[in-house]
Image (spheres, helix red, strand yellow):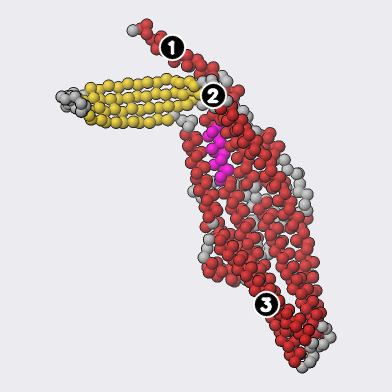
């Protein structure tokens, strides 16, 4: 019996030696993270080319919604984020990604299973065979020794994608806030235009009546009266169209917030036609490093890291895999009520898998993973370039709108004075109906242009809010529904 011991241990020894040789190659198979590639993709200009509003003076660009004089705007954003289906979907994706990360991380630990069975039988074909009762229990364990970090890199990839899903939630919140704010301002601007159209309807109704009275006594021509009657009808058409546009914006807010329309209309009614304003909302500094605040770019970066880890895992799958396995079993056999016969056994040992020939399948998987990483990195570069463009465009629009507003205000005031004077001259018979209609149209267009410029200025602020990441800070702790804080 002693001479058999070396023969029994020889396979274990050979396997252990092979495992030692493989472990010596681990350092060569684990590539470093792509820091240089990410740094190159993140290259941004040292300063924005577009001019900063107010010459870069005053307070920093933060606490956006609390700076507006309309508390309903902040309340509506908060209510929308609490019930918006898009954010609820993002939360569900976070939970899925976290579960997948937990599943991937569990692969680096031993897999232990407890099995138990009991069976009572009697063979039907042979008479007189006693009844047998067999009971078994076993504890099995298996553990992959992660020689080339395949399991670890799969875990890293899953964790990076889980982080990306959390950052996507932040990005969705920022985007939703900007969308709600833009819809809210569009509604208020639309209501203001409705007010202007309603005042125009009232004025033209009165002028058309005066024209009819003057026509009856011969102080107005038929052509001039027809022109003013047509202008009155046109004002009614504009007013009805503008009111319908406002209803459509309300419908959009109902869809975003998920609130009943009657309830939302009641909440919106007190501030009818009042555009929010914030004289204190200014830009002190907006360096190019502001892009680091954008959760969508941070999420894209995590996707790049995940693709890099998956590339490493695919490469590691081309190399040998070592597993340790073991089992402990207990059994008991009883025949026709006789004494129990107990027995137990155990096994333990490594197993090494050496890929020899697979017709290039593993190499193709590694090449595909490398291509996916290249694609993800290129997408990240594109996202960075787009983010720079969005900030620049928002700054350009904001600067232009703030410069245009004073001229639009001056234009509206001047045309209003001209229209009032022309109406007085027409009533005195010193101006024609054509002059009156022209003055009316110029005034209406100038007042509408002023409202549109004011709304464009607010929209530029909201675009800058979104382009700068919404004030989100990577180092700040922000709570995520159903999970830990970032």
- Whichever of callouts 3 and 2 sits on the residue coming sooner in the sequence is 3
* Residue under label 1: 10
Above or below: residue 470 compared with residue 270: above
Residues under labels 3 and 1: Cα distance?
100 Å
- SS of the residue under disc 1: helix
Instruction: Give the class, few, some or many, for how many residues have Cα within 10 Å of label 1's Cα (few <14, many ≥20).
Output: few
Give the residues drawn in magenta, as a range. 153-166
Q: Quadrant of residue 204?
A: bottom right
- Residue 257 point in image, percent of width and height: 55, 60
Magenta stretch contains residue 112: no
Visible in this render: residue 413?
no
Q: Mark 3: few, some, or many residues within 10 Å (few <14, many ≥20)?
A: some
Which residue is farthest right?
430
Q: Which residue is mark 3?
A: 236
| Residue carrying label 2 | 358
Mark 3 vs mark 2: in front: 2
The residue depicted at 60 percent of the width and 33 percent of the height is 369
Q: Observer-nearest residue: 225 or 248?
A: 225
Upstream in sequence: badge 3 or badge 1: 1
Give me the C-alpha separation between circle 3 and circle 2: 78 Å
Q: Which is in the foreground here, disc 3 or disc 1?
A: 3
Q: Can residue 303 be seen here?
A: yes
Which residue lies at the image location 54% right of the left edge and 29% below the top edge?
A: 150
Using the numbered discs, state the Cα–Cα distance from disc 2 to disc 1 in whole angstroms.
Answer: 29 Å
For label 2, the SS is: loop
210 shown above or below 5: below
Q: Quadrant of residue 27?
A: top right
Q: Going by the picture, which residue comes out furthest to the left?
A: 128
């Amino acid at each position: 019996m002693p001479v058999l011991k070396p023969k029994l241990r020889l396979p274990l020894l050979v396997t252990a030696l092979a495992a030692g040789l493989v472990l010596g190659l681990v350092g060569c198979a684990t590539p470093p993270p792509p820091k240089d590639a990410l740094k190159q993709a993140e290259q941004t200009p040292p300063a924005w080319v577009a001019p900063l509003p107010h010459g870069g003076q005053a307070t920093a660009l933060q606490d956006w919604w609390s700076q507006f004089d309309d508390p309903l705007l902040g309340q509506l954003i908060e209510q929308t984020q609490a019930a918006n289906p898009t954010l609820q979907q993002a939360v569900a994706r976070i939970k899925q990604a976290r579960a997948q990360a937990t599943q991937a991380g569990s692969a680096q630990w031993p897999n232990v299973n407890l099995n138990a069975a009991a069976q009572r039988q009697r063979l039907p074909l042979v008479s007189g065979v006693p009844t047998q009762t067999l009971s078994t229990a076993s504890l099995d364990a298996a553990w992959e020794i992660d020689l080339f970090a395949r399991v670890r890199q799969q875990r890293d990839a899953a964790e990076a994608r889980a982080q990306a899903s959390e950052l996507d939630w932040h990005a969705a919140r920022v985007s939703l806030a900007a969308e709600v704010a833009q819809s809210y301002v569009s509604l208020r601007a639309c209501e203001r235009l409705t007010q202007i159209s309603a005042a125009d309807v009232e004025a033209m109704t009165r002028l058309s009546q005066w024209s009819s009275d003057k026509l009856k006594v011969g102080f107005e021509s038929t052509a001039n009266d027809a022109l003013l009657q047509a202008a009155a009808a046109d004002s009614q058409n504009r007013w009805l169209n503008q009111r319908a546009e406002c209803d459509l914006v309300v419908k959009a807010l109902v869809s975003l917030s998920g609130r009943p329309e009657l309830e939302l209309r009641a909440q919106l009614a007190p501030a009818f036609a009042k555009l929010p304003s914030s004289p204190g909302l200014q830009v002190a500094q907006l360096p190019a490093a502001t892009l680091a605040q954008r959760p969508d770019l941070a999420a894209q970066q995590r996707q790049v890291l995940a693709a890099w880890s998956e590339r490493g895992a695919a490469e590691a799958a081309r190399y040998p895999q070592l597993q340790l396995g073991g089992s402990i079993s207990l059994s008991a056999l009883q025949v026709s009520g006789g004494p129990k016969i107990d027995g137990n056994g155990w096994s333990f040992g490594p197993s090494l898998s050496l890929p020899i020939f697979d017709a290039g399948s593993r190499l193709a998987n590694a090449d595909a993973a490398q291509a996916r990483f290249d694609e993800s990195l290129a997408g990240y570069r594109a996202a960075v370039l787009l983010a720079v463009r969005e900030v620049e465009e928002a700054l350009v629009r904001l600067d232009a709108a703030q410069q245009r507003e004073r001229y639009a205000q001056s234009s509206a005031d001047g045309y209003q004075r001209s229209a009032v004077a022309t109406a007085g001259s027409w009533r005195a018979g010193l101006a024609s109906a054509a002059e009156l209609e022209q003055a009316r149209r110029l005034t209406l267009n100038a007042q509408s242009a002023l409202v549109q410029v004011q709304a464009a200025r607010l929209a530029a602020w909201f675009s800058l809010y979104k382009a700068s990441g919404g004030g989100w800070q990577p180092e700040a702790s922000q709570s995520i529904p159903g999970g830990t804080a970032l």
